[in-house]
Image: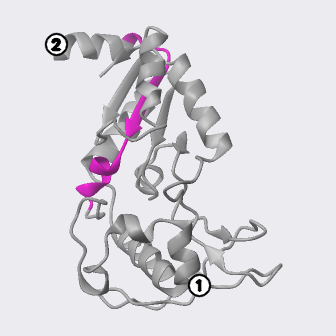
Amino acid sequence: MTTSTLAQQLREAKHIVVFTGAGASAESGIPTFRDALTGLWERFDPAQLATSEAFRADPALCWGWYEWRRQKVLQAQPNGAHIAIAELARHMHKLTVVTQNVDDLHERAGSQDVIHLHGSLHLPRCVDCGLAYTFPLTSEALPEGGSRIEPPRCGACDEYVRPGVVWFGEMLPEDAWREGLAAAEDCDVFLSIGTSGIVYPAAELPLRALDRGATVV
């Protein structure tokens, strides 16, 4: 497909889905799971820290790693991809961002309709009762290499608060998955940006769009 043909299809589209992965945020300095870890985390495989088993075995280590990642996000700025997607939305009838990323860079760039398939670093919840936890407005600066941090406790049941992300082995949030599927099946154009397209079930979305006759890029 030529650039001019794609541009024409974008202009004529009634609904565009932009599907983003880790590559979309990497330019903002957000570490991906393929990046080598440094500091306290250099002897760990990220996949070993992203499980419910890891949290149960060592809550302070697991929470510390996710808090280190969250601080990286807070220090980062939306990059050209985030800004271009938000700008495209302003000129389209309807544009939905479906992201596998757990940062808020799409929202900070100005995107309004964002579906987070893998949760968010900014929306932790109780590991037991599921009550949402709100981070303090200010937090202590972390060492550059990260540190172990005892997780906060739930205000309702006093259990630990867990990161608000989808860990390996967990189901995607039901509402987010349903909304992502609906968007993929409704769109005219489906754009994949910064994603390998091999992580299921999210990788099913472009296939759903293709089955419904959308242009998939």
Query: Quick one: SS at disc 1?
Result: loop
Q: Amino acid at mark 1?
A: Pro
**Residue 17 shows which numbered tag?**
none
Q: Quadrant of the N terminus?
A: top left
Q: Position of residue 52 (x, y in %)?
A: 56, 67
The label shown at residue 151 is 1
Q: Which residue is mark 2?
A: 2
Q: Residue at x 34, y 46 (%)?
A: 82
Write down the region rendered in magenta. Answer: 12-28
Closest to the observer, 196 or 4: 196
Give the number of the mark in front: 2 or 1. Answer: 1
Q: Residues within 10 Å of mark 2 (few under 14, many from 20)?
A: few
* Residue 47, image quadrant: bottom left
Q: Residues within 10 Å of mark 1 (few under 14, many from 20)?
A: some
Which amino acid does the dot numbered 2 rest on? Answer: Thr
**Residue at coordinates 79% horizontally, 68% vertically from top-left?**
129
209 or 1, which is in the foreground?
209
Residue extending furthest toward the right:
156
Q: Position of residue 17 (x, y in %)?
A: 45, 28
